[in-house]
Image (cartoon, grey):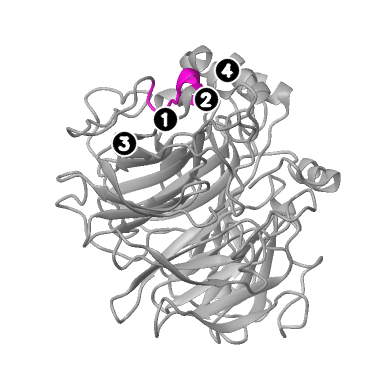
Amino acid sequence: MRFQGRLPAVATVVATAILAACGGGDGGTAVLAFAPPPSLPTGIGEPPAPSPVAEAPPPLTVPKAVCAEGDVPESALQGQVPAAMRQAGFKGFSCNLKLVGQFEGEGGSWSSASFRDPGGRTCAYHATAYPVGFDGKPRGRVNPGVPVIDITDPARPWRSMSLATAAMLDPWESLRVNARRQLLLASNGTNSVFGGPEIDVYDLSADCRTPQLFASMEVGTGKDGGIAPPGSPKGHEGNVSPDGLTYYIGDITQGRYHAVDITNSTRPHMVASFDMKTVDLGIPHGLSVSEDGQRAYVVTVGLPKPDEVLDPAAKTRNGFLILDTSEVQARLPDAQMKVISATTFKDGSVAQHTIPVTIGGKPHLVMVDEGGSAGLSETANVKLACEAKLPPYPMARIYDISDETKPVLVSKMMLETHDPANCDKLLPDIAGLSTFTYGSHYCSVDNRSNGTALACSHFNSGMRVFDIRNPARPKEIAYFNPAGTTSTPAGSNHLQPRAASVASPDWCASRADFDFERGLLTTMCQDNGLLMLKFAQNTWPFAQSTPSTLQN
């Protein structure tokens, strides 16, 4: 999500939608359980036995990775690119991840995906900036839309074509692949809030290098033959159920989560819509769906007011909801999504997305923020969070959801940059920058059914990988922060001021894909484009790791 540069009306939508909240206090977690309807079971069974109690409390920040010989490790705090290094032109850091291939193209924006087709070819796809900028001026695009990149040989990636249908011109954060049904999907997220009701569906089954268009059409307006909720839907975020039958849209403009039936991929139609105003928390953003399609894990975006940041007892709005989506999955007439629980917390904002993952046989949920404790990470907000002694930058966290009515916080992926004790050391780094300076944006696990590793993209800190086999004690095992570029490519949304010819740290903001067989991590950073990274020997996969195409 990006708030800067939006129309005043959009700011009003955000301000009015984020109202009173449940819980709060002491920077901890507040959980509000909702009684299930009488027709539904009242429990989920006996939770698994808890893990053994740790001998000592876990450290505030995750332990640093131990780098291999020949790496270029960080020279200051974990996650930091010091001001002097920025001014000299950032050359990049690497630890247990080596760059084996890159396709810069015209840069990228907020989402990416990959797919291996039945013929053994592997392709990557990523969003790029809309051809016309926020200011109404052309960006100078040459090949607008989603590039289709053959990464079968990761050292020699090449673009076969670009997809430029309505949603693919700018999917924003909604671009997804469903491997089971071999589909590529997106909603129209033009410049974050200027999108429309269109979704695009492509078939990848014949050759991932030449996706075949199944549908590019409006949903939720009545033209699709489905329901028509109040206000014309607009794309921004999105995800697809693991069975590939339902595509969900996170509509920040209308304040709703929409469910679209894609069983017939040539005729998608909207079947349900959940109004976030009914829970009196924040606005929608990203989400994920359980393996059986019976649950959606949706976020509630909270943006605290300055006085709320400094007030330990202020109500909290930022966090996630667990929704019962069984009626959507069953395609009941007038299907409703029903709240099971709402979890909010004080030390984060602008909730981004979630990932349900089984770790050590127990159900967990990864939840990722896009804003720090006082909002997006520009200097004024960072100083305010630091004054409150709260983490100033966004991060990922892991919850135990054995009891889905009472999620329990297990750990936080805090780097040293997140520690408010280090605020004074970091403020010079972000002087003159805005919106996103440090912190997380998107994460992926290596296998949702057997999670052992978590990869998270970070603004200015690159791609970070964590060992989560013990979710209560995660530790960093690798990172790659690409060298800065001296200019912003036409397809990048990294719109930060930079001195002429000075290479500034990149915005790595996309999800990533673990490649078990090849020991690779594929992701996209906005100025550097698509990156194929190789894990150092004995870094990942672990002995306990297993391959999967379901990672978000």
Q: Are marks 4 and 1 in contact (CB under 8 Å)?
A: no
Name the residue rendered at 25%, 22% in the picture. Answer: 56
CA separation in Å, label 2 and label 3: 25 Å
Looking at the rendering, the stretch of residues picked out in magenta corresponds to 77-87
**Residue 215 magenta-drawn?**
no
Marks 4 and 3, the one that precedes in the sequence = 3
Name the residue rendered at 81%, 67% in the picture. Answer: 230
From the top left corner, tell me how far across and down residue 435 is, in percent. 64, 35
Mark 1 secondary-structure assignment: loop
Left/right placement of residue 16 relative to residue 329 reads right
**Residue at the spot of label 2:** 391
Q: Nearer the viewer, residue 21 or 175?
A: 175
Marks 2 and 1, the one that precedes in the sequence = 2
**Residue at the spot of label 4:** 386
**Residue at the spot of label 1:** 414
Mark 4 secondary-structure assignment: helix
Residue type at the position of mark 2:
Pro
Marks 3 and 1, the one that precedes in the sequence = 3
CA separation in Å, label 2 and label 4: 7 Å
- Note whether 269 is above or below 72 in the view shown: below
CA separation in Å, label 3 and label 1: 19 Å
Name the residue rendered at 78%, 40% in the picture. Answer: 15
- Note whether 412 is above or below 420 in the view shown: below
Q: Are marks 2 and 1 in contact (CB under 8 Å)?
A: yes
From the top left corner, tell me how far across and down residue 447 is, in percent. 31, 58
Marks 4 and 1, the one that precedes in the sequence = 4
